[in-house]
Amino acid sequence: MTVTEQRRVWPLPGGIYLEPHKAQSLDSAIGKPPLPQQLVLCVTQPDSANAILDVQAGDYVLKGQLLAHGMDDTGINIHASTSGTVLAIRPHVLPNTSGFEELCVILQPDGEERWTRMPPIPDFTQCSREIIYARIQQAGIRGLGGAAFPSHAKLAPGSRIHTLVLNACECEPFISCDEALLKQYAADVVTGVQILLQASHAVRCLIGIEDNKPAAINTLRAVLTDPRIELVVIPAQYPSGAERQLIYTLTGITIATETLPVEKGFLCHNPATALAVMRAVVFGEAMVSRVTTVTGAALATSGNFEVLLGTPINELLLLCGIDTTQLSRLISGGPLMGTQIANLEAPVMATTNCVLATTAAELPAALPEQACIRCGFCVAACPVLLQPQVLYWHTRQQALAAATAHHLHDCIECGACAYVCPSHIPLVQYFRAAKAAIHIEQAHVAVANTSRERFEFHQARGHEEKLRQEQRRAERAALSQQTHEQVPDANGAQATIAAALARVKAKKIEQSVTANTNKQNNGDTGP
């Protein structure tokens, strides 16, 4: 093991320094909430399609049993978070601001927590990349630090990884689930890292952690013995935990927005994902839970809890003593990049790293927007080196082409620009709306292009059919001409027929005259 606090790191461009609010949720060990009355497990996949259901209403299932599976190699398997009965399969609200419902499996726990596990693989060092890849896919593991991207997809055969990056920064001010996990399960996380090294064939792992987490740093230092793994302590600066920003801080390598880190040989995971990988490989357990921070001044107590996926958020709030009279905002995630929770019946999902219940004093409401004074603070804060004030002017005027030309899609929506804006302009909202408008415009263009291509194809096919018809008519005309040349002249044929008829008629007259002559010679003259 190499602990490299003095190892060179590359300063993050821009960024901001935030007041930490993590201590209140780190006072105790990771807790385990009681079983809820119902679990709500979403089966919608990352591509917005639904997984293929393997159960139906009324089925009894075991903890870890497959409920639905992805349709292809990029799909995610969904497992029962506990044993119980499938009450229904129907749309249900999720923890987002859209209000849209997605297809979910409603599970009623039986309280027995009866497991069904996959065969354990205790000696993963003898496993091939393909075996570990298949196990991670079977277990339904997805990224627990960001957008819940399927973890096995990053290990797809053919990818060439040289560096595994474990993102332990956790730079949002209220979220502490990864820090609590590292303090309590550091050895298991390191085992998960070693499994990922085995599966990816990476030659090293860089663990990036901010310097405001001394307890987690010391715990990691005590358990790291693998020389391939480096612990790199970096300054506590937001958004140091963003994937491309962390890679740059650790290595000095810039990865363009249109390029995936795996295309440059970097495989990024967070500690919770590494722990899930360890449990799936070593113990054969599907991913059925995650550690979630539940915090905020509107709660009597704060803490980190290992929560079963599908647990209604209301259950966690009641567990921590929610004061609804003091509640100002309820957020899934952190205050800068989180989303407002519109319905307390929404379930904990793989992306729910924090449930933040704040008061008006703790997280004041946004002040009224004022005119841009062109101070340039947003430019200094942008970690992607954009010009947010220029993007703001273009997006506000719906000049989408100009916004695109100024690299709007490079914006990671971290909110640093809006945080430092003295005019209280909700810059990220403008940028998100512009991106959505561009996406809709591109969709319309795609539909128009498809219609045009279909029309042109129809026209081309009609033209080809016309040419084929003309060719067939020409061929028939040529065949008719050839036949006409082979048949005798029609007038000659008619003359031949007339001559034959004349000969027959003359012969009949001759026969009649002969008959009359014979009668006269015989004296048969008649009366």
Image: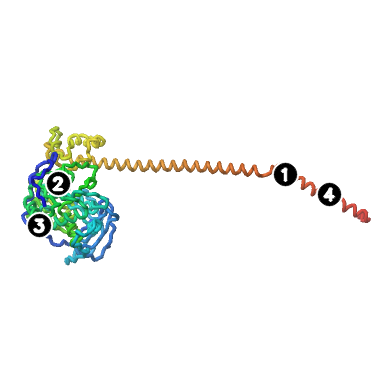
Mark toward the start of the polypeptide (1 vs 4):
1
Q: Amino acid at mark 2?
A: Gly
Q: Are marks 1 and 3 in contact (CB under 8 Å)?
A: no
Question: The disc labelled 4 sits on which kind of residue?
Answer: Ile
Distance from the alpha carbon under mark 3 to that under mark 4: 133 Å
Query: What residue is disc 1 on?
Result: 494
Mark whose residue sits in front, 3 or 4: 3
- Residue occupying the point 17% across, 35% down: 389
Q: Secondary structure at mark 3?
A: helix
Q: Residue 257's x, y, as percent? A: 22, 42
Q: Residues within 10 Å of mark 1 (few under 14, many from 20)?
A: few
Q: Earlier in the sequence, mark 3 or mark 4?
A: 3
User: Quick one: label 3, few (<14), some, or many (20+) residues within 10 Å?
Assistant: some
Structural distance between the alpha carbons of marks 1 and 2: 103 Å
253 on left or right of 455: left
**Amino acid, disc 3:** Gln
Q: Which numbered disc, 1 or 2, marks the residue that appears first in the sequence? A: 2
Q: Which of 215 and 346 lies nearest the eye of the viewer?
A: 215
Disc 1 secondary structure class: helix
- Taking depth in this image into account, of 425 and 194 the one nearest to the observer is 194
Q: Which mark is residue 184?
A: 3
From the image, tell me which residue sits under label 2.
Answer: 241
Q: Are marks 2 and 4 in contact (CB under 8 Å)?
A: no
